[in-house]
Image: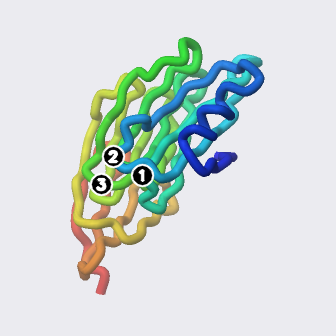
Amino acid sequence: MNHKEWDSRSTLEAHLKEQNRPSLIVGSDAEAPRKFYSVDLFFDSRSIRLGIICSGFGILPSIFTFKKNERILVGHDSAITCVNLDSLKLEFVRRLSGPFYEFIDSQSTEDVIILYELGILRLRLSGSLIWHTPTEVIENFRITDNGQQIILKLMDKNECEIVNLETGAHSSLSSN
């Protein structure tokens, strides 16, 4: 994601109003807003400016674009926000129990896998949950060579959690 950081909400809002381009802000309900970003998106030969307001947990916001769809997901703070680029409306916000880490492409046009500090989940484009595996704090991860599982290294644990990315089934594996 090619984002630009702003020093305040007011400078972000001023930037979004420049050139009279369509724009939208996500994260306006951030608990302690400290980071302000903008991203220029291109959709159906239109240019849209997206503002993202964050509390600044240290992880930059991320955008996931669904193939052949007018919706994007924005991972920011402890939330996933779905934006309809066609109508420029927020479709849903899904709160996470810890900071968002990253999106993992499920190779589907209808859902995505979301990794966050305290778990992993698979979410439909509609916002409905397919599966969820809560964990202790995730310190590191790697996707297996065949792309079917993710191995989660948990903080202060001598074991890893192995999660099937299709079904969400999981098991523990000693890391010794």
Circle 3: element type: loop
Disc 1 from disc 3: Cα separation? 13 Å
Q: Is residue 54 left or right of residue 162?
A: right
Q: Residue at x 29, y 40 (%)?
A: 95
Rendered residue at 25%/76% (across/down): 159
The quarter of the displayed image where residue 132 is located: top left
Q: Amino acid at mark 3?
A: Gly
**Residue occupied by mark 1:** 55
Residue 16 pos. (x, y %): 65, 30
Residue at the far bottom: name it.
Answer: 176
Q: Nearer the viewer, residue 159 or 100?
A: 100
Q: Residues within 10 Å of mark 2 (few under 14, many from 20)?
A: few
Percent position of residue 161, x then y: 28, 65
- State which mark lies toward you, 2 or 3: 2
- Residue under the image location 29 percent in, 87 percent down: 176
Q: Residues at badges 1 and 2 in contact (C-beta under 8 Å)?
A: yes
Residue 154's tag is none
Q: Earlier in the sequence, mark 1 or mark 2?
A: 2
In front: 130, or 128? 128
Return the mark for residue 98.
Answer: 3
Of 109 and 155, which appears nearest the observer?
155
